[in-house]
Image: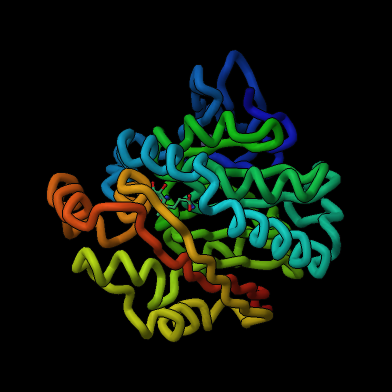
Amino acid sequence: MFPAAALSFLRCPVCGTGFSVADHSLRCETGHSYDIARQGYVNLLPGDARPGTADTADMVAAREGFLESGHFAGLRRLIAEAAGRAVAEAGGGSGAGAGGSDAAGGCIVEVGAGTGYYLAGVLDHLPGAVGLALDISKFAARRAARAHERMAAVVCDAWKALPITDGAADLVLDVFAPRNPAEFRRILRPDGRLLVVTPTAGHLRELVAALGLVTVDERKAERLEQALGADFAPVSSEGYEELLLLGAAEAAAVVEMGPSARHLSADELRTRLAALGGPLTATLSVTVATYSPRTP
Ligand SMILES: C[S@@+](CC[C@H](N)C(=O)[O-])C[C@H]1O[C@@H](n2cnc3c(N)ncnc32)[C@H](O)[C@@H]1O
Ligand SMILES: [Zn+2]
């Protein structure tokens, strides 16, 4: 089911007007129409878009399987708590955004939401909030549409104008996903917050070393500050590390969720993992940072 409370936060990607629901589709004020898929998500990508960076069906299934194993549950809890604090700072999710919100608990937008794993944790933590899970992969959107009853799943491109009204969001969440600072600022309330989770240079360091994988750029944090700098001011930043004990299949899945996977075939990865044998330890190492939008 597509949650009705999400409707007022969405806008037509073609003409920018608002939507109403008619015959299992969203229809804008000038008549553009978008089907609500059988699986409950809405595709708001223009017809000519090429979702080149979208996660494939296999990638989404592997991600879902790994996340269900619970190894990232601690991180999910931390993100939910950080989101709760950020929304409280932002005025407590009053729903009084410029977008004309009718969600009493506020509006949380996750960009590159994948299966909706982290957004569902945030929504559990914030009763009454509505979540919008944006992703360019329809396979991800299918899962996100089922992840939480207060979550709407929308297929769109984070590098383009987002189909979200100005000032709709109390919080924008970005976990290992593409970032579009100007659009994030536009869709946030002026007192809203951006919460970004990025891997540190030491993320999965044991696997990176043992498997000869590509390391995360050590200056990534600095580059993130630079990229966000014109639109956002830093508010808080905390590191999170947890030692994981992984079976070979889980280790393969967690590697395939990250950038290293693009440099190694699935067969080669499994061959190298088989050679290592036994359960493997790997450190989950991320930074959870919040930002406030700069006023123009
Ligand atoms: C590394 S995954 C992270 C997913 C989720 N946040 C998580 O941590 O489980 C990156 C996600 O971004 C999505 N993505 C890639 N390019 C995108 C784009 N241009 N617009 C929106 N989503 C995009 C992918 O389909 C994928 O689901
Ligand atoms: Zn329209």
**Image coloring type:** rainbow
Residue at x 36% of width, y 48% of height: 247
Tell me, yes or no, if residue 15 can be seen here: no
- In the rendered image, is residue 185 in sight? yes
Q: Between 13 and 105, which is closer to the camera in this rendering?
A: 105
* Relative image position of residue 145 (x, y in whole percent): 56, 31
Q: Quadrant of the N terminus?
A: top right
Looking at the image, which residue is at 68% across and 80% down?
235
Look at 22% across and 53% down and name the residue there.
273
Quadrant into which the C terminus falls = bottom right
Q: Between 110 and 239, which is closer to the camera in this rendering?
A: 239
* Residue 295 on image: x %, y %: 68, 78
Image quarter of residue 199 = bottom left
- For the image, the number of numbered tags is 0
Position of residue 185 relative to residue 108, above or below, is below
Task: Please name whichever residue, 24 or 259, is drawn nearer the observer in this view of the structure.
Answer: 259
Q: Residue furthest top?
A: 23
**252 is higher (above) or lower (below) than 138:** below
User: With respect to residue 191, does 39 lie above or below?
Assistant: above
> In x, y percent, where is residue 104?
85, 45
Specify the quadrant of the image occupied by residue 184.
Answer: bottom right
Q: Is residue 113 left or right of residue 122?
A: left
The image shows residue 233 at horizontal and vertical percentages of: 62, 82
